[in-house]
Amino acid sequence: MKIRSLLTTRSMTREFDCLVIGSGAAGLSLALKLAGSMQVAVISKAKLSAGSTAWAQGGIAAVLKAGDSIESHVNDTLDAGAGLCDPATVQFVVEAGPRAIRDLIGLGVPFTPHAPIDEDFPFHLTREGGHSHRRVIHVDDATGSAIQNTLETEARKNPNITVLENHMAIDLITGRHMERGTRDSGACYGAYILDIKANAISTMLAGATVLATGGASRVYLYSSNPDGSTGDGIAMAWRAGCRVANMEFNQFHPTCLYHRQAKSYLISEALRGEGAELLLGNGERFLDQFDPRAELAPRDIVARAIDNQMKRRGLMCVYLDISKKGEAFIKEHFPNIYARCLDFGFDLAREPIPVVPAAHYTCGGVMTDLRGRSDLSRLYTIGEAAHTGLHGANRMASNSLLECLVFAEAAAKDILESAPARQLLGQARPWDESRVTDSDEEVVVTHNWAELRRFMWDYVGIVRTDKRLERAKRRLEMLMHEVHDYYGNFRVSKDLLELRNLLTAADLIVRSAIRRRESRGLHYTLDCPDLLPKAENTVLKPEPRK
């Protein structure tokens, strides 16, 4: 991409101790842990609550009650990860889980109480696929929303946190963007930020920069994620020179409501944990043909089983039935899902509801260590944008919010110990728009976005083949060339930046999938259906800039 290096009248410079790009559980948790002694900016593409955290229904997995154990949670996670989890990371995260939950309780997150009162542990725990115990603490069926609201309230009232909504990061500022004499090619100094409403660009410098931007599931036609899940942090880190790993492992949630107006509304896995069954249109169960755990099998197995039945039988959907639990139970445990399904004409208490799989979670991402540090000094990546080694080839249910909280704390601790004073950062060249104009053909963005999401769904979905991946690769090369030219000639916009990032994420997914010559976890290919003897990560490294 063209480096803009000349002065533009629309550019201004701001400095912070820490710049947090992303406003979900990971970003806000970290900001709150730093705000006691640092000036922190939190960047959000829309409102703070617009990210994936607020959409999370199920809960957070942690060892919280007698009868469960750290060893059991570790083993369940390793089993779900199909041989690719980093055991040290899994141990680190699981051991930190109880402390992370206590912190949320201390902040006032209203977790659902146990009824009747349990003196040993006062909150209700549910069980989800892949877990051998009830260990998922939740707020009814809207856990993410409750956590997001609590963290957002705390962040907004903290005088050391500057909240910048409707702002989007364009690119990270690295040594090549700095004035001579202050540059370090292996460091991050902040980011160029677009004020979406004002259409103005700022240079934001920071002693530490944190990518907490979420995943890239909107690269697919059908997704359970909000519209902003466009792989921004992964793409920016890649362009800046960071390695990424395991991008071929895209988790498809097995059960999203099938309805024209539902926009892939997620039906929590907790329903299956409480006894819901997956059925064909004739009422026949089918999951026990694919795995002895049936409805409690990990998500990749359930999603593939549904995909198999839909394709083999020519079905538009399958059905999820929890009606046998009764109206009182369903309203108590899943009040929001019950009400939302009623909005679309389905009564959970009286009938099965139609469901289909949808892209849900990006298991790969920017490679980090146990402190959230990336390949660039002073650049951290946490949450879904990161590859920590926790998830391996398949994320186990309700480990994602846990990862956000644990690595927010780990990264915050490292930043407090090592981030340089912002006065020592030097000067960055401002954003240059002297050689670009306003676009007169926005149709390029909308058309290419639609084409990308369609062929990624068709060719790089739940089941893959070599021919499908090669078709996707050829189409990506064409689209990336078109968008490269477009980006170099026209002023940036939110839609253009998201398309640019999605193309980068899609390219990383396809390249990773082509390199994996086996079927493991979430990556299943008909051409290589077996496991290789040794499990290895797929690590991609950017080519050095000339």
Image (tube, rainbow, N blue to C red):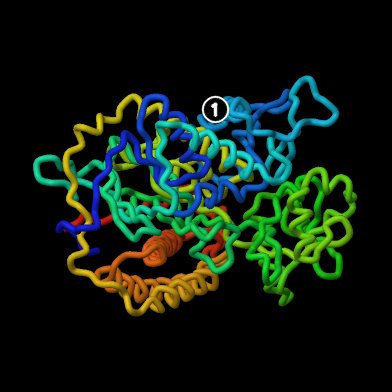
> Which of 170 and 312 lies nearest the eye of the viewer?
170
User: Residue 453: in sight, yes or no?
Assistant: yes
Q: Residue at x 68, y 35 (%)?
A: 137
Q: Residue at x 19, y 50 (%)?
A: 177
The image quarter in which residue 186 lies: top left
Q: Residues within 10 Å of mark 1 (few under 14, many from 20)?
A: many
Give the amino acid type for the residue marked by disc 1 in the picture: Ala
Question: In the displayed structure, does residue 273 sit left or right of residue 35?
Answer: right
Question: In the displayed structure, does residue 356 sit left or right of residue 204?
Answer: right
> Which of 339 and 127 lies nearest the eye of the viewer?
339
Question: Residue 13: x percent and y percent?
Answer: 24, 46
Q: Residue at x 61, y 35 (%)?
A: 75
Instruction: Give SS at disc 1.
Output: helix
| Residue, disc 1 | 96
Point out the residue furthest to the top here: 119
Above or below, 32 against 476 in this view is above
Point out the residue furthest to the left here: 181
